[in-house]
């Protein structure tokens, strides 16, 4: 080896070393000569941080180990020829289709977004006329006892001037007994059918003339007040409305594409 070659070798080794360092800087790892890009690691970490995980060296090491394990298994599958298996090919094709379908839907909604005005218009349409008879809320009290005789006795005491709130202390419903029998505001569907049917027939301040039997026992019911049920605020239901409008957009897209397709 002549002197000029010997002098050139250190420079070559330095260049190769720098190139390898640059390659490692761009990659999270290299497994059997196949690179795992650092961008892929960053993508996985970003997804985890969106779920509340802190971006730490420990997390990055764990993700790197997971990516390496996946690559090792993937290479082993290739080595065994598994991708040529008909069932594997079917599953891969199904996954490919699912990804493409989601991509088409995302693209369509990006180019045809549901606007705030559309959400507001749909909300107004859904809540128009709210407050009908089926949208009422009732504030009732009840006294629940074991037997019809006990319930009849309580009704007689109420007719003689007994205070409902005091007599409610005898109720076997501990939750309402402590509050004078108060059940707070509720829609009719909250209660079992016999209770609900009796309650909605009462006028404000009226007590049931006869005991009401349910699976829980015998009830004496007093209706304290009725009000129209207010629709939920748009801020609360807006996301669901938007989701429904997007579903309709996608349904329309599907119908249009099917109409244009040559199906034999």
Image: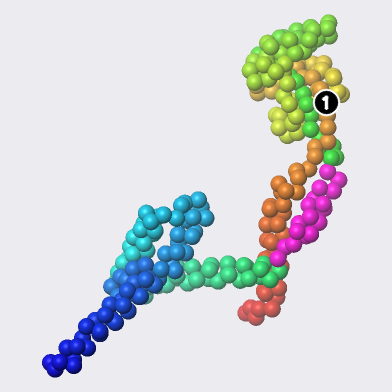
Instruction: Determine which quarter of the picture holds residue 187.
Output: top right
Q: Is residue 1 magenta?
A: no
* Pointer 1 residue: 225
Query: Toward the viewer: 144 or 217?
Result: 144
Query: Toward the viewer: 213 or 190?
Result: 190
For the C terminus, give its image quadrant: bottom right
For the N terminus, give its image quadrant: bottom left
Question: Would residue 45 appear left or right of 232 to someone viewing this image?
Answer: left
**In what element is the residue under mark 1?**
strand
Q: Position of residue 69 (x, y in %)?
A: 33, 62
Instruction: Determine which quarter of the picture holds residue 225.
Output: top right
Mark 1 burial class by Cα count in 10 Å: few <14, some 14-19, many 20+ = some
Q: Position of residue 165 (x, y in %)?
A: 75, 13
Residue at 82%, 53% in the rendered image: 125
Q: Position of residue 17 (x, y in %)?
A: 28, 77
Up/down of 47 relative to 138, above or below: below
Q: Which contiguous range is marked in magenta?
A: 113-130
Q: Position of residue 107 (x, y in %)?
A: 63, 71
Residue at 75%, 48% in the rendered image: 234
């Amino acid at each position: 080896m002549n002197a000029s070659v010997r002098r050139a070798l250190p420079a070559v080794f330095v260049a190769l070393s720098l190139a390898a360092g640059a390659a490692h800087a761009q990659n999270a790892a290299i497994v059997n000569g196949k690179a795992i890009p650092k961008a892929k690691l960053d993508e996985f970490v970003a997804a985890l941080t969106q779920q509340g995980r802190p971006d730490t060296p420990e997390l990055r090491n764990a993700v790197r180990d997971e990516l390496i394990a996946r690559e090792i298994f993937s290479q082993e599958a290739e080595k065994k020829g598994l991708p040529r298996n008909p069932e594997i090919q079917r599953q891969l094709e199904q996954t490919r289709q699912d990804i493409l379908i989601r991509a088409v839907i995302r693209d369509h909604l990006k180019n045809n977004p549901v606007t705030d005005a559309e959400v507001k218009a749909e909300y107004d349409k859904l809540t128009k006329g709210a407050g009908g008879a089926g949208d009422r809320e009732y504030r009732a009290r009840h006294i629940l006892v074991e037997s019809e005789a006990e319930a009849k006795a309580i009704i007689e005491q109420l007719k003689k001037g007994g205070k409902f709130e005091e007599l409610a202390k005898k109720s076997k419903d501990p939750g309402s007994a402590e509050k004078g029998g108060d059940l707070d505001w509720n829609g009719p569907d909250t209660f079992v059918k016999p209770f609900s049917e009796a309650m909605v027939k009462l006028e404000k301040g009226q007590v049931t003339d006869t005991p009401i039997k349910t699976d829980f026992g015998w009830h004496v019911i007093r209706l304290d007040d009725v009000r129209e049920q207010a629709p939920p605020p748009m801020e609360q239901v807006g996301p669901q409305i938007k989701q429904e409008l997007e579903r309709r957009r996608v349904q329309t897209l599907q119908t249009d594409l099917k109409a244009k397709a040559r199906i034999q």
